[in-house]
Amino acid sequence: MTTSSSAIVRRDPRKEWIARNRLHPLHHEVISEGLGHVIGPSGLPRKNPHQIGFIGPNGIKRIDRLKGNGAAVSQPHQAKSSDTVLPLHTVTAPDFYIFVVPDLVGGRLSVHDKDILGLAHALQADMEGKGAVVAVCFGDTKEEHFDLAGVDRLIQRTSDEFDGFSPEARAAALTQMEETWAPKHWLFPDSVHGGTDLASRLAASLGERPASQAWQVTPEKVVCRGAGGSLDIARQTPRIVMVLEECGNAIDETRHQVLPLEMPAFHEHTPRILDRGQVAVDPNEIPLAEAEFILSAGNGIHNWPQFHQTAEALGATEGASRVAVDDGFMPRFRQVGASGTWVTARVYMAVGISGAIQHMQGIGQCDKIIAINTDAGCDMVKRANLSVIDDSDLVLSELMLLAQAYASEHGNQQGSKKQENSDAA
Amino acid sequence: MPLNIVSLVSVGRHPQSGRARRAEQDSRAVELGLKLADTALTVLHVGNPDDPILRQYAGMGLPSLTVLKQEDSVDAVPVLQRFLEQKNIDIVLTGVRAESGESSGMVPYLLAHALGWPVVARVADIVAVKDGKAEVLLALPRGQRRAVSIQLPFIASMDHAAEAARQSAFAVGLRATVESVESVGEVDQIRVDWQESVAKIRPKRLKTVKAKTAAERFKAATAKPEGGTGKVMKNETPKEKARAIFDLLLEEKVIR
């Protein structure tokens, strides 16, 4: 335990019970405990008024006339619980390693990644000896809390070979890690973000038979989906496992060391697959449910041509609230919310939408929400990561200018791979 | 020079009825093969040459199919490898995952490793093949596309974003000839030990509240998810506000 012993308040439920019960034969003794029983010069018992009560959280003396029945009694030590530091899980000399290769969608650990890190710890705990969970990250990351996600050791490869779409280089780097550390297990997310691809490449080059679409993983046995999801295959746990979503519990009670592991220099290798960068897709062709960036309009929009121009300039998929659809400004299939589409955008920008509960349900899975609204007290502002309280016309026109300036600045670099590593990596 | 393209097909399974059908992704591989090579396309299957499902692929307009005759328990990869090595092949098209058997999706990778070819997963389209190189569009999540160029020969697995397969004509399928080729195969020894059962419904993860006291549990059950963590800009000029929004969009890399 890292918390000091003085912070722990020991309660005696029996004494508290006696203190509450004035008819109890021991009541008087319990109440006056610590005060001492003082007999005055006249022979009468005396109370010292200065010793009654305690100093409250504001530094003001409080007398508890509720005899321990109130919530205030236990207040002083509860205030600390919000900023308690989680205990540190240390692995000094690991007997074995479990390697996890997270997807790092948009440079951050996804829920799927965190679950798999948690699963790796669960596996490690069930096996003999003490293991360390290693996360292998390619390219730049924005993740700040590897320690809270359960990463004991971190391998970060940030050279040019691994930028953008580079499955061959990544698989070669993983093969090299296999030679260096010979991990007990390799865990990959079975996902469309590249986890499955990388795992399959590694398995083919190592000649291992992997378990794909695994959903129950123990050190001995793994249960996988087969035959298009209609079959459960139970088998011995192989070294390479691709794990489906929601198959482990993310770490939430410990901190981890995140010590860097030194990686030997990468062998030179000529890629046979050349990345030509992401292709510009018309954002309005993308189905609303899977769009990455949505600009959504509500009742607060008056200048509709401006809204469409802004969406085009920003490259956002257009969405709408129910009011905007009912009023005929947007087609029905653009509606976001309970009776429209449930969106999964990474960035959702709500312009002039105050946030009816049906609408908030529809955007429940969005990561970052930006609100532009004139009402500072509306629900959308409460939910948003960034809220701008202003008229939508002014902000959108400024935003359009910025987007156009950015496009003209970067227009000549379109072919380069600089803007890679978004969600669709 | 005409391209030498092979589409690998398997027997699929309808997700609702469980009936055998032409597999969704494999039929897309045939569709793309027809687009690139027309009827010069080789459609290859490992298994039973008398399977009526193969006629559904042939019904897409193929004069013939090639079937490497094998039992179900045989590992298809070495059989395919030996067949593909003999021919001078440019592109092999497959699905991402079979709808029957293990459906591990490893066949393209194992074949690529055995043949020493590059492999790309989740192809949406092959735009052009020129000078020993192919321009390929990959399907990314969220409807995005990535352009990639690959040296021939290579193996590609088809994504759901690829063009949907044309309707299969019954009579055309019946008229097609099925060339059965005898081949040598080994029984998949690792798979013999596995236990297979009908898929159980996966339990949904419940929202568990890790509260130690009754007060915390009560709070978790009743309290609204608190907001107010976001940044609110009220008194700045519209320019500054727009700048803040744009910086966030840049940071999230949604602006291209």
Image (tube, coloured by chain):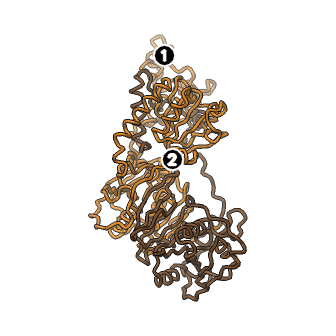
Chain colours: A orange, B brown
Could you tell me which quadrant the C terminus of chain B lies in? Answer: top left
Q: Earlier in the sequence, mark 1 or mark 2?
A: 1
B187 to B246, vertically: above or below = below
| SS at mark 1 in the image | loop
Disc 1 from disc 2: Cα separation? 83 Å
Query: In the shown orientation, is residue A87 left or right of residue B65?
Result: left
For the image, the number of numbered tags is 2
Mark number, residue A282? 2
Mark number, residue A47? 1
Mark 2 chain: A
Q: What x and y, as percent, mark residue B111?
A: 47, 75
Q: What x and y, as percent, mark residue A98?
A: 42, 62
| Residue at x 42% of width, y 72% of height | B152
Query: In the shown orientation, is residue A287 left or right of residue B150?
Result: right
Which residue appears farthest toward the left when viewing the image?
A265
Quarter occupied by residue B220:
top right
Q: As shown in the figure, which amino acid type bears the numbered disc 2?
A: Asp
Mark 1 chain: A
B52 to B234, vertically: above or below = below
Which residue appears farthest toward the top when viewing the image?
A42
| SS at mark 2 in the image | loop
Q: What x and y, as percent, mark residue A278?
A: 43, 53
| Residue at x 48% of width, y 10% of height | A42
Q: What x and y, as percent, mark residue B241?
A: 42, 28
Could you tell me which quadrant the N terminus of chain B lies in? Answer: bottom left
One can see residue B252 in this view: yes
